[in-house]
Image: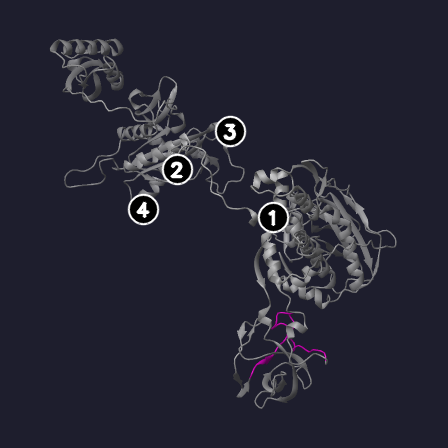
Amino acid sequence: MKFTLSWLKDHLETDATLDEIVERLTAIGLEVESVDDKAALKPFVIAKVLTAARHPDADKLQVLSVDTGSGAPIQVVCGAPNARAGLIGAFAAPGTYVPGIDVTLSVGKIRGVESHGMMCSERELELSDEHNGIIDLPADAPVGTSFAAYANLDDPLIEINLTPNRPDATSVHGIARDLAASGLGTLKTAPVETVAGKGETPVKLTIEAPELCPGFALRLVRGVKNGSSPKWMQQRLIAIGLRPINTLVDITNYLTFDRGRPLHVYDARKVAGNFTVRRALDGEKVLALDEREYTLTPDMCVIADANGADSIAGVMGGEHTGCDENTTDVLIESALWEPLNVARTGRHLGIITDARYRFERGVDPEFMVPGLELATRMVLDLCGGEPTEAEVVGYAGHEPKVVSFPLSEVKRLTGIEVPRDESLSILTRLGFKPLGNGEVVDVEVPSWRPDVDGKADLVEEVMRIHGVDEIVPQPLSSHDAVNGKILTTLQIRSRSARRALAVRGMMEAVTWSFISARQAELFGGGKPELKLANPIAAEMSDMRPSLLPGLLTAAQRNADRGFGDVALFEVSGTYEGDTPAAQRRVAAGIRRGTARLDGAGRSWSGNAGAVGVFDAKADALAALEACGAPVDRLQIEAGAPGWYHPGRSGVIKLGPKTVLGTFGEFHPRTLEALDVSGPVAGFEVFIDAVPEPKAKPTRTKPKLELSAFQAVKRDFAFVVDKAVEAGTLTRAAAGADKKLITGVSVFDVFEGASLGEGKKSVAIEVSIQPVERTLTDEDFEALAARIVENVKKQTGGALRG
């Protein structure tokens, strides 16, 4: 939002300096981004041409003798057709930067004649596009004085950065209101006078889409003369970056910034019949004022006449009914539009205008009719003409919001005590109306503040005017012990899993949460509720049900670039439904090629083998152990999901129902569907499924107890059915005596005809740690008998003879 200092003072009676105003604007939340004090125009002075003689070597150039009021005349070579003796204009001396041509002047020779500066045109000073001649000032212009001061060009320009919740500050009047409320002057609040019209507006209006247009005001002014707008208006519009077009259009642009009231003008002779506010037809086209044709959809709102759509409501007018120098009868529109619809329309069509900027934030509904009256008065003053009565359709009046405001909230939310009377006074100065006398008052919100909805918004209003700098910085107070838990259990587990997998030589990857529908269906997803309404790409249409598709395709991309032996992992979220409870926290990883824990690739001492199911199993158990899962009590079962190889995969469970993860080599059909090659094994563990550990009375580590007796190892070989899992056998052996047996591991598996059909031999090593005394042979024999009995009972196995 840009405005000049003199423009601001049209609405604010103040003696404050520019620096004070800039500082106060930032202090009250209207952050100043830049200030142009027009210092660049100070070197230009008013000068008089004493003589003008033809250049000896150029027919179109003249050699001027110029009086700058500082002593002897200065010689200037000039090519302007209107240069003549007696002309008074703007002079730039050597060393002056001329903004219109982006040149810093120096003494130079033009066709052999020295020139000590230049006489400037309006375009060279960025006053207008006029470049047919140099500036021609009246005869009474004071020679030798500042041209900027004489032409009112030394008006500082201020630019503020607006947040989307401040539609009231999109006008100079609104900014002045805030400054006045902060005590930096008095707001000029002259009422808008109603213009007396003659007869009804001949163009009638029908609103077919009231949900998109809460109100519409229209008036015809006959017999206008539409030429160039006054110099003061042009200067202000140019200063804020707008190009003056003609008086009627310039008035609408001026009021857009002056009062935050976007308007539109139609050439009444180009309008066919009456106006209708309706939804656009599917595929309907509009040639807009930017001379581009836009194709509309039924979600958009238009103002149409008998010939079709004339303008895009709240965004941009149409070219066919626009006003030009031939306009004699003008229709002035002041309407209200639904903010979200304007925002969606502008974003869809890619149109950014000052009108859209204000309508999508919310304009003051109570200023719709006064805005029309103000525009009519300016048209009459600058263009003449005879107005009709205003036609107002659809507007039912504004119902002000009332917010309950406990005054104690100021202290609670900001930590600073603001007296009750001061809080209410601030709100009153800002246009709010406090109702009541207690510690909780109802506050009526003004029509120009649609952003204020609750008590916290009122606290913000009080504090930004009272002074946010009054809040004294204070350190945060500690509410817990020094070593108290800060992270959640899920955060701790996620970090622990990352660290454990990184230690195992895997590299962390971050893949997209969106995958293609084909990949989602392949990994058990593809539900309708998990499809994206507006995917960023066709191959990213579904929320991922698993981390594995992203990791597998990432590994293949590495392989395609010559890095085939990769181990990747990711700890992130997967989605089984569209509710928070259906989002899982998962740690997943894959190994490709020879990327095993003990190294990858070829070596003279022996080549690394390809990754397999047991590599994935070890990674999964390492991640679960890092997350606090009781690894010694986990069960490994068959029945992994279909994307794994059925004979080289498993499911990790805690008890009969709690699934903690899956692992295995991938099914060839899965790899083929993903266009992934090579041996690949992977896993997924569900971090959020690991049960919470039982709370301990103390966080101190238990006492280290070491046995003074020698540990002993005993080997057993059991003949069992081939269907019996080794894990079942080892658990059976370990359960024979949980106090003495500290570990059971498989060291050999044998299958042969000598064992019988459907049989295998599994050899295990049992670690025994005496605790109370040295065990005797009888003790070992009794323990061995219990181990054999336990294995027989749970697996049907017998000692191999």
Whether pointer 3 and pointer 1 mark residues with C-beta atoms closer than 8 Å, the reply is no
The numbered mark, 3 or 2, whose residue comes first in the sequence reads 2
The numbered mark, 4 or 1, whose residue comes first in the sequence reads 1
Q: Amino acid at mark 3?
A: Thr
Closer to the camera in the image, 359 or 333: 359
Where does residue 37 sit, x and y in percent of width and height?
59, 66
The numbered mark, 3 or 1, whose residue comes first in the sequence reads 1
Where does residue 587 sit, x and y in percent of width and height?
37, 32
Q: Amino acid at mark 1?
A: Arg
Q: Which mark is residue 464?
A: 1
- The Cα atoms of the two marked residues, 3 and 1, are separated by 39 Å
Is residue 600 in the magenta section?
no
Q: Amino acid at mark 4?
A: Arg
Q: Secondary structure at mark 4?
A: loop
Q: Main secondary structure of the magenta part?
A: loop
Question: Which span is picked out in magenta?
Answer: 116-138
Where does residue 399 sit, x and y in percent of width and height?
74, 39
- Name, please, the residue furthest toward the bottom: 56
- Residue 268 appearing in the image: no
Q: Amino acid at mark 2?
A: Gly
- The Cα atoms of the two marked residues, 4 and 2, are separated by 17 Å
**Quarter of the rendering containing residue 197:** bottom right
- The Cα atoms of the two marked residues, 4 and 1, are separated by 57 Å
Residue annotated with mark 3: 579
- Residue 753 appearing in the image: yes
Establish if 540 lies above or below 727: below
Which residue sits at x=73%, y=65%?
A: 229
Is residue 124 in the magenta section?
yes
